[in-house]
Amino acid sequence: MQPGLRTVCGVLVDALSTVLREPVALTVAGRTDAGVHAAGQVAHADLPVDLDGGWLVRRLARLLPPDVRVRAVTPVPAEFDARFSALRRHYRYRVATAPYGAEPLRARDTLAWPHALDVVAVNAASAQLLGEHDFAAYCRRREGATTVRALQELHWDAEADGVVTAAVAADAFCHSMVRSLVGALLDVGRGRRGVDWPGGLLARGERASEVAVAPAHGLSLVAVDYPADAQLAARASTTRRVRVPREN
């Protein structure tokens, strides 16, 4: 929630508080940049134990605006934390390389890219970014926050009608990290940068000004993974620890 701004969290909190007739605090799995979609967002709140989840979904469907939907309400153990218990977040970035741009029905979640995209080169560059690194070159630094992240998946696939989709997964992402990675790799795909350039930026230790941040609307948070119930508390404890870069 942000004062004076319309956010998904703010809209949902207002709707929940209206339906339940009491203030509701919401904890979400991840904060997305303005304009980024979240088809797989997860949130938790403390609600009455006898609440009918199906009833709440139906009530919210009538109250929420068309651009916010709650798909399911599910009881979870007390140890569950939508943010800190998460194992990884999965994102997709859609790029339309067809000369006519993005299909009208997908224009809100697909970047129209007016250039050819060398998928082989982009995947070769992406492979060099996998693993745990300091991604400071790709992050907007926030005071007191670490930029060390474990990138577990970064792969591009050509689909039908000239659409190329990047699949990205990590235990967590820092501010603008995914869009910055995509922006750097798009420069590789169009031939403006070499395959080794994105990986080479990891040694910078600070934001790389030459990295273009890809537009927000092409990016979607599609899923969040959690451990088994018995590991929820341990995972939350591990996630709260601040990571530091490993020595080479």
Image (spheres, rainbow, N blue to C red):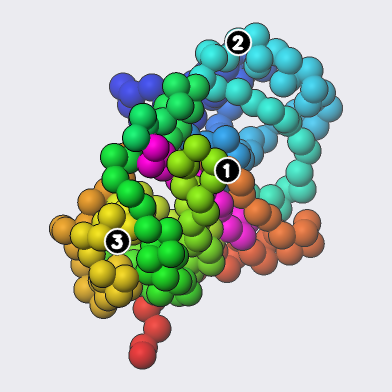
Where is residue 232? Give x, y as percent. Answer: 70, 59
Spatial CA distance of label 3 from label 2 is 45 Å
**Amino acid type of disc 1?**
Val
Q: In this orientation, which residue lies closer to the viewer: 124 or 248? A: 124
Spatial CA distance of label 1 from label 2 is 24 Å
Q: In this orientation, which residue lies closer to the viewer: 120 or 49? A: 120
Q: Is residue 40 magenta?
A: no
Q: Which quadrant of the rendered structure holds the C terminus?
A: bottom left
Secondary structure beneath dot 2 equals helix
Residue 195, above or below 226: below
Residue topped by disc 2: 63
Numbered disc in front, either 3 or 2 = 3
Q: Which mark is residue 188?
A: 3
Q: Looking at this rendering, what residue extends furthest in the bottom direction? A: 248
> Which quadrant of the figure has residue 125?
bottom left
Q: Which quadrant of the rendered structure holds the N terminus?
A: top left
Secondary structure beneath dot 3 equals helix
